[in-house]
Image: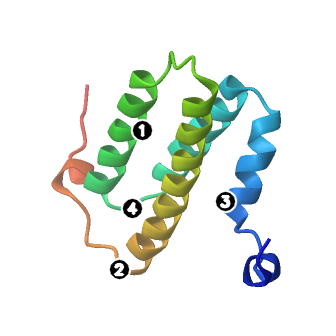
Amino acid sequence: LPSFLATQKESPIRLRATHICNMSFRTASLKLYRNMMREAKHFKDYNFREYILRRVRTQFHRKMNVKDPQEAELLVQKGEETLGIIRRQKTIDNLYSSGGSVMEKIQFHP
């Protein structure tokens, strides 16, 4: 290894990805799915929250039957990066939240 590579620390995403290689793809993807859905539910803005929930569901359903282990590992790594983005956006949304959506203000009375 070149000296500049040996002194750099591993990124947390890469360390988690190597740990995930030991778990099965199904276990890792279910854990990732639950974490993404949990983080998305914490958005205050209705539009962001529903968009992220919908995107997470559709992407996981599309990639549910992946058989290639290399592709599965790549998908989990990309999912971990996306989870980090969701967490950062959640923080920004909570700092600069809007007054609320019309959809949240409507109360349905049966």
The residue mark sitting in front, 3 or 4, is 3
Real-space Cα distance between discs 4 and 2?
10 Å
Picture quarter containing residue 55?
A: top left
Real-space Cα distance between discs 1 and 2?
23 Å
Q: Are marks 1 and 2 in contact (CB under 8 Å)?
A: no
Real-space Cα distance between discs 3 and 4?
26 Å
The C terminus lies in quadrant: top left
Query: Residue 26 location in percent, x, y?
Result: 67, 23
Query: Residue 19 location in percent, x, y?
Result: 80, 46
Q: Pick whichever of labels 4 and 2 is earlier in the sequence.
A: 4
> Compared to 4, does 93 lie above or below?
above
Which residue shows up at 39% across the image and 61% down it? 44
> Compared to 107, does 4 lie above or below?
below
The residue mark sitting in front, 3 or 1, is 3
Query: Residue 84 location in percent, x, y?
Result: 55, 61
Q: Are marks 4 and 1 in contact (CB under 8 Å)?
A: no
Q: How many labels does the image show?
A: 4
Say how the picture is coloured. rainbow
Disc 2 marks which amino acid?
Tyr
> Compared to 44, does 64 lie above or below?
above
Which residue shows up at 64% across the image and 26% down it? 69
Callout 1: 10 Å neighbours few (<14), some, many (20+)?
A: some
Q: What element carries label 2?
A: loop
Query: Residue 28 location in percent, x, y?
Result: 69, 34
User: Which residue is tagged 1?
Assistant: 56
User: Which residue is tagged 3?
Assistant: 13
User: Which residue is tagged 4?
Assistant: 44
Q: Pick whichever of labels 3 and 2 is earlier in the sequence.
A: 3
Q: Furthest-front residue in view?
A: 2
Which residue shows up at 75% across the image and 69% down it? 10
**Horizontal side, residue 43 vs residue 35: left or right:** left
